[in-house]
């Protein structure tokens, strides 16, 4: 375990090309989203710079940007800390997610084609494998890809843009309940695929609404357990 609480191997490689500050930002955001950096964790510039192999300046710039976007809290005389989302914050975002995803499911069913169905089935199979292997990070990643594919099949660029704005936070909130949701989440995905394949817009909408509501309830239940 590293001094900042990062598991060995958790630090992502900085992707090239692109401005260094942007690559450091993306690396830190990924660590926060996957909870390699936990909510409330103290973020020490020098340690993060050492782990990422960069100077402190791009780390400082990245932390300021993350603060502006609500991922990091900068506290006077204390430093930077990963933001701890309130239950209300999570509830509001997951409620908006339900609205977006339900409409995406309806549109995906309306325009269903065999290639899209096959892609959803392949993603579902990969997600099920991750659950079987107790690979939480893999399951979270495949869950995000599955929902992104539904959004793609919806064919509405504005809806996709809005969904992209909340996707990172959905992953952030989903990670701590991914193991709890486990197999049931992917059973619900299978049911959704069937509704989309049948071009049943009403059922696809209902299933997606119920599916995202289950995740929202699981997130709040974990805080009470």
Image (cartoon, helix red, strand yellow):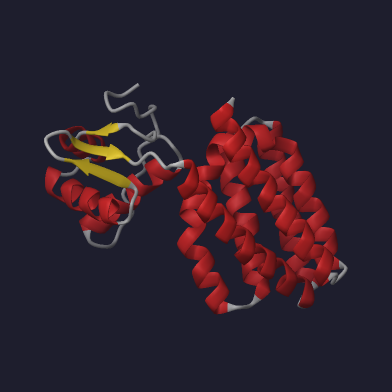
Identify the residue at image location x=12%, y=48%: 57
**Quadrant location of the C terminus in the rendered image:** top right
Q: Is residue 6 shown left or right of residue 129?
A: left
- Asked whether the viewer can see residue 172, the reply is no
> Residue at the right extreme?
198
The quarter of the picture where the N terminus appears is top left
Q: Is residue 38 visible?
A: yes
Q: Position of residue 29 (x, y in %)?
A: 36, 48
- Which residue shows up at 49% across the image and 59% down it? 166
User: Which residue occupies the foreground of this view, 36 or 74?
Assistant: 74
Say which quarter of the image contains residue 77: top left
Asked if 28 appears above or below 50 in the picture, the reply is: below
Give left or right: position of 208 versus 22.
Answer: right
**Of residues 29 and 94, the one drawn nearer to the viewer in this rendering:** 94
Q: Is residue 51 above or below residue 192?
A: above
How many callouts does the rendering have?
0
- Which residue is more in the foreground, 8 or 32? 32
Residue 3: image location, x then y, percent: 27, 23
Write down the quadrant of residue 132 in the picture: top right
Left or right for 89, reference 28 = right
In percent of width and height, residue 193 lies at 79, 59
Q: Position of residue 80 (x, y in %)?
A: 22, 39
Residue furthest toward the top?
1
- Quadrant in which residue 114 is drawn: bottom right
**Image point 34% across, 33% down: which residue?**
40
């Amino acid at each position: 375990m590293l001094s900042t609480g990062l598991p060995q191997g958790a630090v992502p490689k900085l992707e090239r090309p692109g401005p260094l500050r942007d690559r450091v930002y993306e690396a830190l955001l990924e660590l926060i989203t996957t909870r390699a950096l936990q909510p409330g964790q103290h973020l020490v510039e020098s340690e993060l710079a050492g782990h990422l192999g960069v100077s402190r300046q791009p780390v400082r710039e990245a932390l300021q940007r993350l603060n502006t976007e609500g991922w990091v809290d900068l506290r006077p005389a204390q430093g930077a800390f990963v933001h701890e989302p309130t239950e209300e914050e999570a509830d509001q975002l997951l409620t908006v997610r339900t609205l977006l995803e339900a409409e995406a499911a309806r549109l995906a069913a309306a325009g269903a084609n065999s290639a899209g169905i096959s892609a959803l089935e392949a993603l579902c199979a990969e997600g099920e494998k991750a659950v079987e292997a107790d690979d939480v990070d893999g399951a979270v990643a495949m869950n995000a890809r599955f929902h992104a594919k539904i959004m793609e099949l919806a064919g509405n660029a504005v809806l996709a843009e809005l969904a992209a704005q909340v996707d990172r936070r959905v992953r952030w909130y989903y990670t701590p309940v991914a193991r709890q949701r486990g197999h049931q989440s992917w059973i619900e995905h299978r049911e959704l695929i069937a509704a989309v394949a049948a071009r049943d817009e009403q059922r696809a909408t209902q299933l997606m609404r119920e599916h995202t509501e289950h995740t929202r309830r699981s997130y709040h239940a974990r805080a009470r357990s």
